[in-house]
Amino acid sequence: MTAAALTSPAAAARTVTTVRSDDAGALLDRLPTEGALSWVRRGEGLVGRGEAARLEVTGPHALTEAADWWASFTDDLDVDVDDDLGIAGSGPVLFASIAFDPVAGTSVFVVPEVTVGRRDGVGWITTIGDVDPRDVSASFPPEADDDPAPRLRYADGALDPATWCAAVATAMERIGAGELAKVVLARDLLVSADVPLDPRRLLRRLADRFPDCWTFAVDGLLGATPELLLRRSGRQLSARVLAGTAPRGAGADDQRLADALIGSAKDRAEHALAVDSLVRALEPYCTTLDAPAEPHLLTLANVRHLASDVTGTQRRRGPRGAAGLLELIGAVHPTAAVCGTPTRDAAAVIAELEGMDRGRYAGPVGWLDAHGDGEFGLALRCAELVGDDSARLFAGCGIVAGSDPAAELAETQSKFAAFQAALEG
């Protein structure tokens, strides 16, 4: 079953204009209070507003249909781009938030009317329609950061902590019996505020606290993900795999925790499963593929992760021609980092034990341009805004042999803290 496009490509055929803009300003200040679109890291990336076209799609061929829809949309555009720009993300852009299970869940694709970008110090503005990008306002008035922090009320999501720990224990029994090697179990946390939640304020606070993460927003799902699922630039592919997590500490304890993580046999085994699953999925599409023999530590404000950067060169042709980025995303997702291994068995355990619909949590999120270049992360450390004053937070953990339910619960609390700090600050 496929949901119809809310704006069809034929109806949206318009002029696209891109101009260099040396005064693009802070990208996150260019966002409206509603319909914010964001993919920003260290002040560079893309933000968008307005909707020139939109697709919501569900079903076994969701990503293929989305790729065809995007190709049809771009074919109908009259593109006017500065000849000397030549930067990935300039021109028409598609923001995407894909369901964790694209077959059962709804994936959302949005083409903004206005896109503001910056890469390698070069800024630009793209518009679709009759608006001249030179007339686009510099920014929207942001909410004052000195406004009182909202009063928040938290409530358990699908499972309370004790029930979730019992689910982890059941998963460990399955792993011990040899039914699977790893499963990622997530939980949600509900929050309501006494005032409307401003996504711009949340995104700025996330970006300030986690500058090495990709601060994203698509259709009310926003967060700061440390994991790059896949980047494509021409034929060059790259990814950052994270699996294995430890909390931060104070003083000497922080280094002790770091040393324990890098030396943890349990965490290194979990990490190897995640790297192997990505490599196996990409191998048919690549002429070269390189993964490091040893992970490194990625240090964030609240946690550390074992991390591996994987790079490859895409084949010029495949069985069905050169694969597009959305086809590659469909091939690599879900990795063991967000599902488990073997994938089918882990997905079945998630459906049985997790007790909630993930929706677009832990699904691919990012952008794609008209040339097929783009970047997709995994929607982690995130929340889905529900109405004006409520949100649903998510956090998950990889369960393997040797996991401890209480320690996994504490890990979810550490991951919730990333978004809670943005809410409470």
Image (spheres, grey):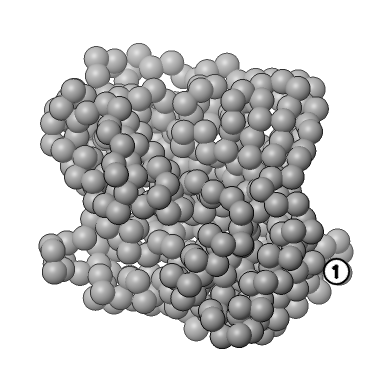
Residue at the spot 67% in from the left edge and 72% down from the top edge? 170
Task: Residue type at mark 1: give it.
Answer: Asp
Side of 346 where 254 appears, left or right = right
Mark 1 is surrounded, within 10 Å at the Cα level, by few (under 14), some (14 to 19) or many (20 or more) other residues, namely few
Q: Which residue is mark 1?
A: 253
Residue at the spot 38% in from the left edge and 17% down from the top edge? 136
The answer to whether 95 is drawn above or below residue 8 in the figure is below
- Quarter in which the C terminus is drawn: top right
Number of marks: 1
User: x and y percent of residue 347 in the render?
Assistant: 49, 65
Side of 303 where 33 appears, left or right = left
Query: Can I make out residue 16 in this image?
Result: no
Side of 187 where 194 appears, left or right = right
Q: Nearer the viewer, residue 160 or 330?
A: 160
User: x and y percent of residue 300 in the render?
Assistant: 67, 57
Mark 1 secondary-structure assignment: helix
Query: Can I make out residue 37 in this image?
Result: yes
Q: Nearer the viewer, residue 188 or 48?
A: 188
Looking at this view, name the residue that lies furthest to the front.
Answer: 352
Give the quarter of the image for residue 137. Answer: top left
Residue at the spot 53% in from the left edge and 79% down from the top edge? 180
Residue at the spot 70% in from the left edge and 81% down from the top edge? 402
Side of 41 where 318 appears, left or right = left
Give the quarter of the image for residue 245. Answer: bottom right
User: x and y percent of residue 192 in the render?
Assistant: 72, 30
The answer to whether 265 is drawn above or below residue 258 in the figure is below
